[in-house]
Image (cartoon, rainbow, N blue to C red):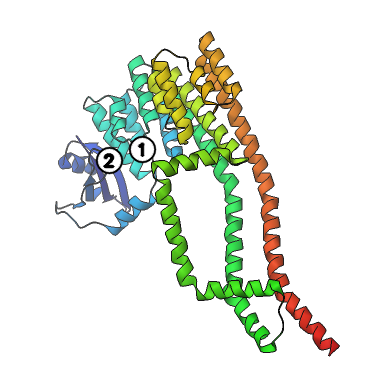
Amino acid sequence: MAVYEYTGKDGSGKTVKGVLDVDGVRALKNALRRDRIFLIEYHESNARGKSKGKIGVGGAKKQGSRELDLEELLTRITPQDISEMTRQLATLIKAGVPLVDSLAAIVEQVENPKLKRILARVRTDVNEGAPFWRALAVHDKVFETTYYNMARAGESSGNLDTVLARLADFTESQVRLRNKIIGAMTYPVIMLCISFAIVTGMMVFVVPQITVMFEDLGADLPPLTKVLIMSSHFVTGWWWLYVPGVVGLVVLIRRWLGTETGADWRDKTLLKVPILGDLIRKIAISRFSRTLSTLLSSGVPLLTAMEIVENVVANRVLAKVLAEARNAIREGDSIAGPLKRSNQFPPMVVHMISIGERSGELENMLKNVSESYENQVDTRVNALTSLLEPLMIVFMGIVVAFLVAAILLPMMKLTQAVQQG
């Protein structure tokens, strides 16, 4: 069977788009005819869910469509899409619906066209005898290593519905954490952009006119005004030099940070930054403990789970600690021992993991650690947000005060000179 993305017209002339999993083009046309849909064009998806060339109703291959390309570029599969789909699939399987039928129902419900196409391909692979987790692993850019490894454990143990429910909980918790961080950074970024736009507008349009007036008067200008005029001359006269220079510098820095040395330096430095470093460490520990707890409770072996969590902490320093811990575990050591020796994990986390290992309640202890650190992250983010708002107001006030002082001081000086003369 194959997966086809089609475009057609219904009885009222309305354009209809969708995805069908059928055995060939003839079956596609017959299925659409039963639904009173006239086929206009279709795309056959390959094994990774990407559309092949567009084919018209007469069978002729069409040139690439700009509209389709634009849709492919703009449409993203978000973690929220994955979470909702996973929750729905877990509910259907728990209700006793077979996996293939559950996937077919999900394909009908999902609105994201990219995800719809990929799920249709997953259903086809499962229907042809492939394990569910392997069908997911083909699309590793959509379903991460954590996802399909947990699905593999759920299939092996016969608890796929329970594992999918845990996956949905896990994905939702990651989405909430990500949204909190993005929400905290939105206001400062907007304020910085507004400040930059105001200053640039003043430098380009206002200051040059004032500069001409001051030069005609021949007045001795205050230092603040001289700095403002020099900055304006630089912005308006040398923009062709500093814009490419800034862009080139950013590109060079990004390339260096993409190297092993640069990435190690970046992650090591970030952990040492006051306030921000502590927040990054708490987020990484929360992800580590939540992911490891979810994997272990889903039946994933410890060594495999430790290998997976190395990629979720998003910090190379902590990832190396976890890699060393995995090697130590392979040689018979505990989890807590290597983490304690690294001095990168707080004593409370190490202590709780140690208790969990000794009591056989490691999954619950890791879950408690995750919840504790998620609350700490939430509190810290709220505090930083509350602090950033007045700081940004003060920053903008300083910028505005500088501009006003640089413009008004020479005017006041000229006024005094006229009055005295």
**Image point (41%, 30%), residue name:** 86
**Image point (72%, 66%), residue name:** 401
Whole-Å distance between the Cαs marked 1 and 2?
Answer: 10 Å
Q: Residues within 10 Å of mark 2 (few under 14, many from 20)?
A: many
Horizontal side, residue 183 vs residue 240: left or right: right
For the C terminus, the quadrant is: bottom right
Q: Residue furthest right?
A: 420
Residue 266 in the image: x percent, y percent? 48, 43
Horizontal side, residue 172 vs residue 145: left or right: right
**Image point (65%, 85%), residue name:** 215
**Front of the two marks 1 and 2:** 1
The amino acid type found where label 2 is placed reads Gly
Horizontal side, residue 401 vs residue 98: left or right: right
Q: Residues within 10 Å of mark 1 (few under 14, many from 20)?
A: some
Is the C-beta separation of discs 1 and 2 under 8 Å? yes
Q: In which quarter of the image is residue 27?
A: top left
Disc 1 element: loop
Depth check, front residue: 412 or 249: 249
Q: In this view, does 124 lie above or below 182?
A: above
Query: Which residue has dot 2 on it?
Result: 49
Q: In which quarter of the image is residue 83?
A: top left
Residue 135 in the image: x percent, y percent? 28, 30
Q: Which residue lies furthest to the top in this view?
A: 359
The amino acid type found where label 1 is placed reads Val
Horizontal side, residue 91 vs residue 278: left or right: left
